[in-house]
Image: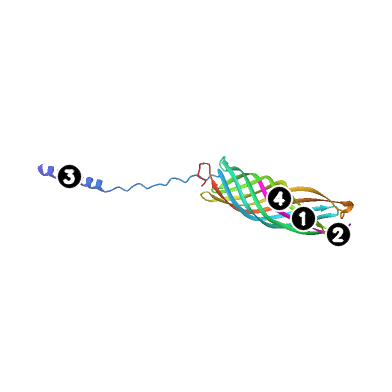
Amino acid sequence: MRKHFLMLLAGAIGLAASQASAADVPRKAPAVVPPAPPPITWTGCYIGANVGGIFGRAETSFGFGEVSTNNSGFAGGGQIGCDYQFAGGWVIGIRNMFNGTSLSRDRTFFDPVTLSSGTADFHVRWFDTLTGRLGYAFAPGWLLYGQGGVAWVKSSTDVNFAGIDFGSFDRTRTGWTAGGGVEWMFARGWSAFLEGNYMDFGSNDHTLFDPVCPAGVCTFNTHAKAATVLVGVNYRFGWGKAPY
């Protein structure tokens, strides 16, 4: 009996010692799960720069015919705007873009009535567009959009006829614009875009009074159109919410 009692006592002591030893072994800390990144949103405002090409068509209609020219040049400038994302992936926004251009082209014309020749020099100095846009975020960080609104252009036509310089008919025209593009949010606070736009500035009538003109009066009409292909980058800052 005593022998069995001693054996049970020894087993209990051994079990207690083994449990104590196991308790001294440090336990492995649970894996740290990083928090989920904030959702990508286009809500916020931005400022940026752009560069690209401008392709123009200028038409001047005289009493004896029309002089037209297609030309291309450089365009570059900046933009500022704001977007608001709603209903999942839909985005509405407003933007103003101002660009200078190097668009310029000379054309020579001939009047069969007076047998005189002349030149018309077309220039587009700058354009400014104020547009609203509607887009859809079709993938994380990607936005497809269309836009349209009002456009202003600073254009001039220099006319020389029969050796007489009639000067520059310089004015700021108002027209409309429409286009679209795609924008990619490639890093926190930064996005890049590629877009194309069309601008039409309507027709304008001009009258010149000079003895060289038939009956002392020359009238002509000018019409300017342009299209742009631009790439740009925006720095985006949210309304208290990380954009990426």
Q: Position of residue 88 (x, y in %)?
A: 56, 41
In the picture provided, is 219 more to the left or to the right than 139? right
Q: Amino acid at mark 3?
A: Ile
Q: Mark 3: few, some, or many residues within 10 Å (few <14, many ≥20)? A: few
Instruction: Kindly report the distance in space between the C-alpha atoms of the residues bearing marks 3 and 4.
Output: 99 Å
Earlier in the chain: of badge 1 and badge 3, it is 3
Residue that carries the numbered disc 4 in the rendered image: 154
In the picture provided, is 139 more to the left or to the right than 159? left
Q: Residue at x 15, y 43 (%)?
A: 9
Badge 3 vs badge 4, beta-carbon distance below 8 Å? no
Residue that carries the numbered disc 3 in the rendered image: 13
In the picture provided, is 81 more to the left or to the right than 159? left
Residue that carries the numbered disc 1 in the rendered image: 158
Badge 1 vs badge 2, beta-carbon distance below 8 Å? no
Q: Which residues are magenta?
A: 110-129
The nearer-to-camera label among 1 and 3 is 1
Instruction: Kindly report the distance in space between the C-alpha atoms of the residues bearing marks 4 and 1.
Output: 13 Å
Q: Position of residue 32 (x, y in %)?
A: 38, 47
Residue 114 shown in magenta: yes
Residue that carries the numbered disc 2 in the rendered image: 116
